[in-house]
Amino acid sequence: MKKLLSLALALIMVLCMVACGEKPTENPDDTQPVTLVYAEVNPLDSIVGQVASYFKEQVEKLSNGSIIIDIQASGVLGSENDVLDSMIGGATTIDISRISAFALNPYGTEKSKLLTVPFTFQDRDHYWAFANSDLAADFLAEPQSINLPLRGIFYGEEGFRHFFTKDPITSMKDLAGMKLRVSTDPVMTGMVKGLGADPTVVAFGELYSSLQTGVCNGAEQPIANYKSNAFNEVAPYMILDGHTLGAIEVVISDNAWAKLSEEQQNVIMEAGKLTQAYNAQIIAEAEAKVMDELKAAGVTFVEVTDKAEWANACADVIKENTADQAELYQQILDLAK
């Protein structure tokens, strides 16, 4: 009798909830949004910071709030390599990261290495022809193909990278003997050696103080990141050699991917497509504006009208890093209009 009474009461409660427009809360966790932590080494006001913010907006909009992107900017979660070490090591504290294309090279990727070979892309249009091609999809899938627990979402760019220094610089010859900051990327290290300078490994978060103290005499960055990190305060000379286009990639860990439903996974990829298009739309104008601001702040820019001398100095590193993928590299070169 008591069991029948209990069942009757439970049925009455359910009917009342339905009548009032409420749903039984049997699985409250199903309605909770998934929060994904997004690591960005640069500030939010940088171009890549704007890209992160746009991606967040699109994901949250397309998912109707079922996915929340928590952007942790300005390197608070560590350098790109620190973040990748954590994600690849299986940690669940970081889900998504914006990285430079070369950041994956030490982890065994080969295809992405081609994007960082100096003087590969003739201009911005050449790069975007690649980023919107079928080739790019294969490159984004490379981490999965070599069993890294990451998958690429989309490509973007933060402008061509140029050398900046503490002391005046007017030509490639002025780099001779300079201690120029590099990451652990072997392509970048080889390029700096080819230009006659001394590659000096310094963590990105320590670069400002290293320029101040003379640990290094200069470094290289896209114009927007140079400004957003205030490097112009300690190294106000930049030569516009454009040795490498600052290709970027946004990746998500397998752990994070597994937390998402198939519908949510599709949202992430669709938001990536929209963000890639947004990046292409804003980059040129945003970079030009930053350059004007830097000129007003006293930065001295030197144009490089003939890059043949620079490219010739990097001939060995170009050959060394493309020989085993010559056909694929030629496909990238052939995308130039």
Image (tube, grey):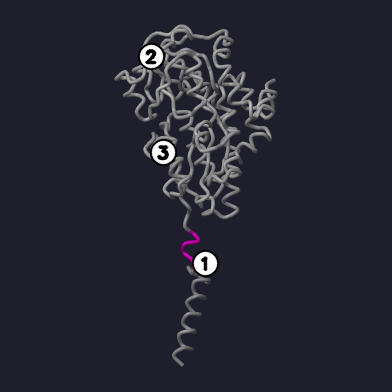
Amino acid bearing label 2: Pro
Judging by the rendered image, the residue that carries numbered circle 3 is 82
Judging by the rendered image, the residue that carries numbered circle 2 is 236
Q: Earlier in the sequence, mark 3 or mark 1?
A: 1
Task: Name the residue: 46% across, 88% down.
Answer: 3
Whether pointer 2 and pointer 3 mark residues with C-beta atoms closer than 8 Å, the reply is no
Task: Name the residue: 53% across, 53% down.
Answer: 258
- Alpha carbon separation for disc pair 2 and 3: 28 Å
Q: Earlier in the sequence, mark 2 or mark 3?
A: 3
Q: Nearer the viewer, residue 91 or 298?
A: 91
Q: Secondary structure at mark 3?
A: helix
Task: Name the residue: 37% across, 16% down.
Answer: 217
Is 100 included in the stretch rendered in magenta? no
What residue span does the magenta drawing correspond to?
27-31
Q: Nearer the viewer, residue 150 or 111?
A: 111
Q: Secondary structure at mark 1?
A: loop
Q: Secondary structure at mark 2?
A: loop
Residue 236 appears at what percent x and percent y? 38, 14
Judging by the rendered image, the residue that carries numbered circle 1 is 21
Amino acid bearing label 1: Gly
Q: Earlier in the sequence, mark 2 or mark 1?
A: 1
Q: Nearer the viewer, residue 191 or 103?
A: 191
